[in-house]
Image (cartoon, rainbow, N blue to C red):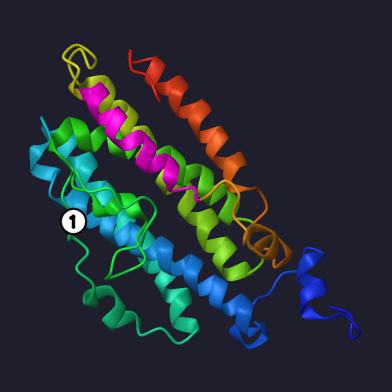
Amino acid sequence: MAEDMTIRDYLARGGKLTSPANVPPRYRAELMKLMAIFVDSELAGAAGFADMINQGPGIKERIAAAKIVMEKTDNAGKVLRIMGDFGADTARYANHHPWAARLDRAADIGTSRGEHDMRLALFNYPLEGWGDAVVMNLLMGHAVTIQLEEFGKVSYQPLAEAFRAILPVERRHAELAQEGLARLLEPASDGRLQASVDYWWPRVAASFGAADSARFESLREMGLRHQSNAELRTRWEAEAADILKGFGLRGL
């Protein structure tokens, strides 16, 4: 960075930061929020899916579910370690929140955060059986893949590297969900899987955030965002709808 260039200008021109010592306060706050949302969502998602392991219809499915739970927890740990560089109490953080807590299935909280942590809103809703868990994991798995491609370009280099390492793991989780859906007998025949799609689709779509987010331009200038919420959501809708079509299911 040139001596006469401010950090704001440096970031706006695509510069990268590599140490907490170089991070300005506002940037730090936004970076910590991004990391907390990811960590909390991974831990809450893993906790919810853990209850589904023994509902898998076969050994292969149960192994896949256990693998997803383990790897999501590990992914959270990778980012939590970076939060620790900024002073987060990582040991207390991982054990303090009720990650398995869920609201009633009929609750409608929009994009609101829960009172305990920063998990994405959809991780406050319970899963209802194996098929429902597979559908949610398929839809959210593809959303996470798209979001991680975006976050892999953030201007804080250690976090960008962590997200790029996590991306293929989360992509494989989406693939496992797709394989799991394929193994369900006549998946669209009785309407239950379509009902799960109808339930989870708007909740996963909401995870991309508001289409007209006023914060986007500020985050873009800091190098923490590149594509808008609307762009990412539109891509997800097209890709998810195409996958569902192959199973005789439809998105909203």
Q: Which amino acid does label 1 sit on?
A: Arg
Looking at the image, residue 152 sits to the left or right of residue 59; the answer is right
Residue 174 screen position, x and y as percent: 38, 37
Residue 62, by quadrant, is: top left
Q: Is residue 19 visible?
A: no
Identified at 18% across, 60% down, the residue is 100
Residue 6 screen position, x and y as percent: 82, 81
Identified at 14% across, 38% down, the residue is 128
Residue 57, by quadrant, is: top left
Identified at 55% across, 67% down, the residue is 159
* Residue holding disc 1: 102
Residue 212 screen position, x and y as percent: 60, 49
Residue situated in front as seen by the camera: 176 or 31: 31
- Above or below, 248 against 225 in this view is above
The verdict on residue 130 being magenta is no
Looking at the image, residue 249 sits to the left or right of residue 65; the answer is right
Q: Determine the main secondary structure of the stretch shown in magenta.
A: helix
User: Which quadrant is the C terminus positioned in?
Assistant: top left
- Above or below, 135 against 168 in this view is above
Q: Can residue 72 be seen in this view?
A: yes
- Above or below, 54 against 195 in this view is below
User: Which quadrant is the N terminus positioned in?
Assistant: bottom right
Residue situated in front as seen by the camera: 187 or 58: 187
Residue 28 screen position, x and y as percent: 58, 79
Instruction: Give the magenta part as a residue range.
Output: 193-209
Identified at 33% across, 17% down, the residue is 249
